[in-house]
Image (cartoon, rainbow, N blue to C red):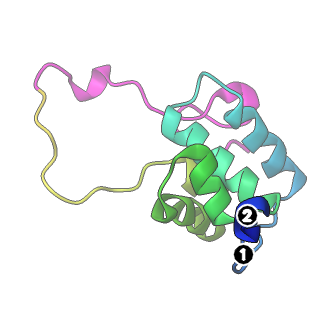
Amino acid sequence: MNESLTKPRTRTGPKPKAIHLDPADQQLLHQIAESTYWAPWQVRRAKVVLEIANGARVADVMEQMNLSRATVQRACRQFEREGLHGLMTQGHRTGRPRLNRSITSSSRKPIGPSPEIGLLPNGLLSG
């Protein structure tokens, strides 16, 4: 019998650069990851950072969450550079903005953190 067919495949390659979370950030990321209040992209970023911080490999997170390598690495870099606030806010996008005349700037609801877990609705950390 062919041995390569009977042996379980294990991931090889370098482990990702470790992300160190302080207990407050870890608790907040867990709350975001389990929440239905937050936007899906915010929940996804929180889950990615938690998985990598727990020692998961990028390839495993990619497979488990059906994400590209660039998406996983981008979330990790963003957390390392800008912390939790940078991870949970959308950056400035270049290019021409969409024109949607039915929505005025005063009627838009901010996408962002809930005040009940220590962040203000506009995405800024409280305190």
**Nearer the observer, 5 or 55:** 5
Three-letter code, disc 1: Thr
Label placed on residue 9: 2
Instruction: Name the residue that disc number 1 marks.
Output: 12
State the residue lying farthest toward the right. Answer: 23
Q: Magenta stretch? A: 101-127
Verify CB contact (< 8 Å) between mark 2 and mark 1.
no
Residue visible at 51% across and 64% down? 69
**Number of the front mark, 2 or 1:** 2
**Nearer the observer, 85 or 12:** 12
Q: Mark 2: few, some, or many residues within 10 Å (few <14, many ≥20)?
A: few
Magenta stretch: dominant secondary structure: loop
In x, y percent, where is residue 41?
50, 40
Label placed on residue 81: none
Label 2 – label 1 distance at C-alpha: 9 Å
Q: Based on the displayed image, in which of its 4 quarters is residue 93 positioned? A: bottom left
55 drawn magenta: no
Q: Quadrant of the C terminus?
A: top right
